[in-house]
Image (spheres, grey):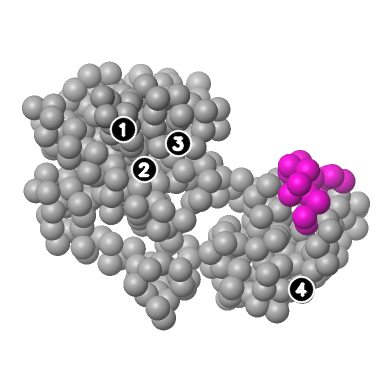
């Protein structure tokens, strides 16, 4: 028989745990499903200096361990399970957290294969029923797919210049990418170092013109065109990268390598359940997108205030953190969105009785 709960929280990053703390303190006895990346992307981070309350900094895994302990202290049940399928067509909502296909990871199947998997899985009894759900599955930074990049993540390799630029003062750093995110990362790093190089596989950027000009005209930023990183070198710390430029390899000394080739929201299981942006982020009335603005307009109440801003296209399902956030992608903003989703869910549950 499936477990029943008033509120299920999918995801264990800052958004998920923050929501759990608030819902648990409201005596809603939330069940938090820790998900695919337990603790979120901060588990791959070393020292975090920009989370309020930790003036001397705190290690990413230590911060997330504190989130978990605090959520459990107030009564959250943390389950180290992933959600492989959901049915949001009616309440109570249904979640499946087990499958019998061995080591298969359904979250990375292509859409057609996942649809077949889901149809088969939903023939089995569901594992959890929830009156409301908060989706906080986050987003994953796209990687190059080469050896050592995950091993050295947080040890010279980073996916967030805004988070880590200050650690690389006067160091030799490289940014991989050609879009606005790469331009933003290069400019952030140039505030701390005069040895910034952008590596791009084409001979022109795809970023907006104004961002391109800022980078191209910056005296501290150099460009390696028609180039790609083919090796990340170092044992316990990044020490160099190997770059292929127009058929020739060169090994370059490197203190930092910033991957800015995009983020992928973890939303594959919600594709036919919730409204998503063209980039597969979940749409809420807080989304800084055209779809989000349209949703917000439709949620204006008699006082001209948006009702339940963190609610998705399905009544009773809320979303928070990097799975919604197309802009900031910071631990503190994810945490705040998680709190907002928890308060919205609590209010919605109270009024929907």
Give the residue drawn at x 70%, y 79%. Answer: 170
Asked if the stretch drawn in magenta spans residue 228, the answer is no
Which quarter of the picture shows residue 60?
A: bottom left
Query: Is 167 above or below relative to 103?
Result: below
Q: Secondary structure at mark 2?
A: loop
Q: Which residue is mark 3?
A: 287
For marks 1 and 2, give the CA distance: 19 Å
Q: Please tell me whether residue 279 is drawn above or below residue 177 in the rendered image.
A: above
Q: On the image, numbered disc 4 is attached to which residue?
A: 194
Question: In 3D space, how far apart are the residues under numbered discs 1 and 3 (Cα atoms)?
Answer: 16 Å
Looking at the rendered image, the disc whose residue lies closer to the viewer, 4 or 1, is 1
Residue 305 is labelled as 1
In the picture, which quadrant includes the C terminus? top left
The mark nearer the N terminus, 3 or 2, is 3
Distance of label 4 from label 2 (alpha carbons):
37 Å
Q: Residue at x 39, y 32 (%)?
A: 284
Give the spatial CA distance, label 4 vs label 1. Answer: 47 Å
Q: Which mark is first along the chain, 2 or 1?
A: 1
Q: Is residue 2 visible?
A: no
Residue span colored magenta? 201-215
Callouts 4 and 3 close, C-beta under 8 Å: no
Residue 320, label in figure: 2
Counting residues from the start of the chain, the first of labels 4 and 1 encountered is: 4
Q: Which is more foreground, mark 3 or mark 2?
A: 3
Question: In the visual, does 187 lie left or right of 133?
Answer: right
Give the CA distance from mark 3 to mark 2: 10 Å
Q: Residues within 10 Å of mark 2 (few under 14, many from 20)?
A: many
């Amino acid at each position: 028989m499936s477990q029943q709960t008033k509120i299920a929280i999918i995801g264990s990053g800052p958004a998920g745990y923050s929501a759990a703390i608030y819902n648990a303190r409201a005596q809603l006895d939330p069940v938090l499903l820790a998900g695919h990346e337990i603790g979120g992307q901060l588990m791959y981070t070393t020292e975090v200096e920009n989370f309020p309350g930790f003036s001397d900094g705190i290690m990413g895994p230590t911060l997330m361990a504190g989130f978990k302990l605090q959520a459990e202290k107030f009564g959250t049940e943390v389950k180290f399970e992933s959600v492989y399928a959901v049915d949001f067509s009616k309440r109570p909502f249904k979640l499946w957290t087990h499958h019998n296909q061995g080591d298969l990871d359904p979250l990375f199947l292509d859409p057609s294969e996942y649809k077949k998997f889901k149809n088969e899985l939903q023939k089995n009894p569901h594992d959890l029923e929830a009156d409301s759900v908060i989706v906080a599955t986050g987003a994953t930074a796209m990687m190059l797919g080469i050896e050592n990049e995950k091993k050295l993540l947080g040890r010279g390799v980073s996916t967030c210049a805004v988070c880590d630029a200050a650690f690389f003062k006067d160091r030799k750093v490289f940014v991989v990418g050609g879009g606005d995110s790469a331009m933003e990362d290069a400019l952030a790093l140039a505030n701390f170092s005069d040895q910034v190089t952008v590596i791009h596989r084409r001979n022109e950027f795809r970023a907006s013109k104004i961002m391109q000009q800022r980078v191209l005209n910056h005296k501290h930023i150099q460009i390696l065109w028609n180039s790609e990183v083919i090796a990340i070198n170092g044992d316990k710390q990044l020490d160099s990268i190997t770059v292929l430029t127009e058929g020739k390899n060169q090994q370059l000394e490197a203190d930092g390598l910033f991957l800015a080739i995009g983020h992928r929201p973890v939303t594959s299981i919600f594709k036919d359940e919730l409204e998503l942006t063209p980039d597969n982020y979940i749409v809420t009335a807080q989304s800084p997108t055209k779809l989000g603005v349209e949703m917000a307009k439709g949620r204006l109440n008699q006082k001209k205030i948006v009702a339940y801003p963190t609610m998705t296209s399905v009544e009773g399902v809320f979303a928070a953190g990097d799975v919604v956030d197309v802009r900031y992608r910071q631990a503190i903003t994810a945490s705040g969105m998680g709190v907002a989703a928890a308060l919205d869910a609590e209010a919605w549950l109270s009024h929907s009785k």
